[in-house]
Image (cartoon, rainbow, N blue to C red):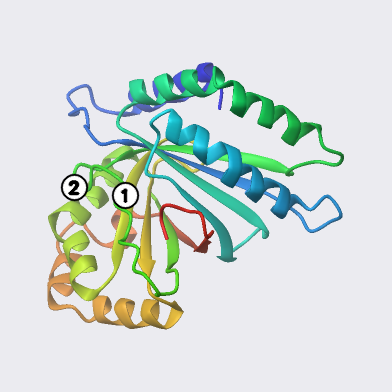
Amino acid sequence: MRRREFLSAAAGISLAMPLDAAVPKGSIIELRRYQLRNNNDQMMQRTSEFIEKFALPAAQRAGIGPNGVFTTLIGPQMPAVWLLYSYPSLAAMEAAQAKTSEDKEFQQALEAYYAKPGIAYERVEATLFRAIDGMPKVEPPPIEKDKPARIFELRVYESNYPSTLRRKVKMFEDGELAIFRRVGMWPVFFGAALAGSNIPNLTYMLGYDSLAHREQVWRAFSQDAEWKKLRVQPGLSDAEIVSNISGTMLRPMPFSQIR
């Protein structure tokens, strides 16, 4: 995403927000989706190897992290690689990008990545989020030795207006997020979109031990007494604050910091 495009998008968001809105303090989360296709260009192998050997090490040298790399397990437009970067602030994001632009090893590898015959990917889409105050940074699950990697769910809650989205965020901060943790889900991040598609939206990631574990914890969540009380409070029904919900199941790659 070009800096000028980001600033224009951010300006549009600011016009939609009330003048007295408090400035959030959460970290900045960047989520990229590399759309691939199955062909003789070996896009999946080429892109994942580049990320593992060059993109992630360069990000670490620039102070970016924690980071995650995933493939689509269940969802639309497969195959795809998802790359999650996190930064303490917008200023830190710009500083890190400046460092990677001056990283000779990374820039040489990037040129070689693009120079190979065929194409590396079909398209890349990027969304920028501000972490909510109730979960101000990315929280990777602990990596447990001799235990299979988790699966992750990326959920997107679209809303009609910034005001209704703020109500949904407050709902998570006032109780829903705590219920998630209590029933056995692992929240990784919660972010309100600053730039990208389908704004306004709240996007969040949850970790599970398996697909069976996902079914178990969501069943427990739906039956939770505190959740039943929260969802019937005036102004907090889905019909009032959420216009669309979508989800994608992700599998972490072996070299991902979030797995």
Residue 66 image position (x, y, % from top left): 37, 44
Q: Is residue 79 above or below residue 216?
A: above
Q: From the viewer's perspective, is residue 178 above or below residue 164? A: below
* CA neighbours of label 1 inside 10 A, class few (<14), some (14 to 19), many (20+): many
Image location of residue 210, percent across then percent down: 43, 77
Report which residue position mark 2 lands on: 134
Q: Nearer the viewer, residue 89 or 60?
A: 60
Indicate the secondary structure of the residue bearing disc 2.
loop
State which quarter of the image contains the N terminus: top right
- Tell me which residue sits at (18%, 78%) in the image: 224
Mark 1 sits on what residue?
A: 190
User: Within the image, what quadrant is residue 157 found in?
Assistant: bottom left
Pointer 2 with pointer 1, Cβ within 8 A = yes
The residue closer to the viewer here, 133 or 22, is 133
Task: Identify the residue at horizontal 12%, vertical 72% (top origin).
Answer: 226
Taking 46 as reference, is 24 above or below it? above
Which amino acid, mark 2? Gly
Question: Residue at left 15%, top 65%?
Answer: 230
- Residue at left offset 30%, top offset 78%: 217
Using the rendered image of the protein, determine whether residue 8 is visible from the camera's viewpoint.
no
Residue 115 position by quadrant: top right
Q: Mark 2 or 1 closer to N-term?
A: 2
As rendered, which of 234 and 50 lies closer to the eye? 50
